[in-house]
Amino acid sequence: ETVCNADTFKIDLIVNGETKTCEFDGEKIAMSDEYHVVCPRFATVCPNLVCPSSCAGQGECMWVEDIPYCKCFDSGLDSANCDDMPPGPRSGTQSDPGSTDNETVILSELLKCAGTGDMGAIRTCAIDVINNSDLDESTKSDLAACEYEEGSLEILA
């Protein structure tokens, strides 16, 4: 049996009444001299504990920590899954303390590009937003490096 432990953010394996804890994804745990169990991905077995509801489309799942968390677009929001606000791009500043008002404006404008039509129009809109921003030239160049892949456009940051 597998149990999602919300207190430790780990998976507990229960076999023949004995509990073993998965310390990390892919860990091999000896259950006896004869066999071992490979711990599954925590995010696969316990999706409700990892960025619940994919941050409700109102934030970004931050995988840089041992326990992934939602960084909500609205810095005043502190819910686990950013779900207590209506859908749509957020105004105001981001949760990231290094964020600036200018970055927020640029992000807001880039989000608007998504509704401009086909991939070519989206790319053109994104490049216009970047070029018309007051970022340094090196940052503009990095942001404008776009890739097409299977009908999607990724603006590299």
Image (cartoon, rainbow, N blue to C red):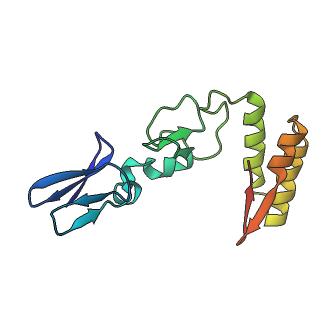
Tell me if I can see residue 82 in this picture: no
Q: Name which residue lies at 88% across and 34% down.
A: 134
Residue at x-position 16% and y-position 52%: 19
| Residue at 78% across, 53% down | 113
Q: Which residue does the image show at 46% across and 43% down from the upper left?
A: 81
Along the line of sight, which residue is nearer the eye, 128 or 45? 45
Percent coordinates x, y for residue 74 in the rendering = 59, 34
Of residue 24 and residue 42, the one placed in the foreground of this image is 24
Q: Quadrant of residue 42?
A: bottom left
- Residue 2 at least partly seen: yes
The N terminus: image quadrant: bottom left
Left or right relative to 103: residue 67: left
**Residue 111 picture location, percent across and down:** 72, 48
- Horizontal and vertical percent position of residue 56: 51, 49
Q: In which quarter of the image is residue 14?
A: bottom left
- In the rendered image, the residue lying farthest to the front is 33
Q: Is 150 placed above or below 62 here? A: below
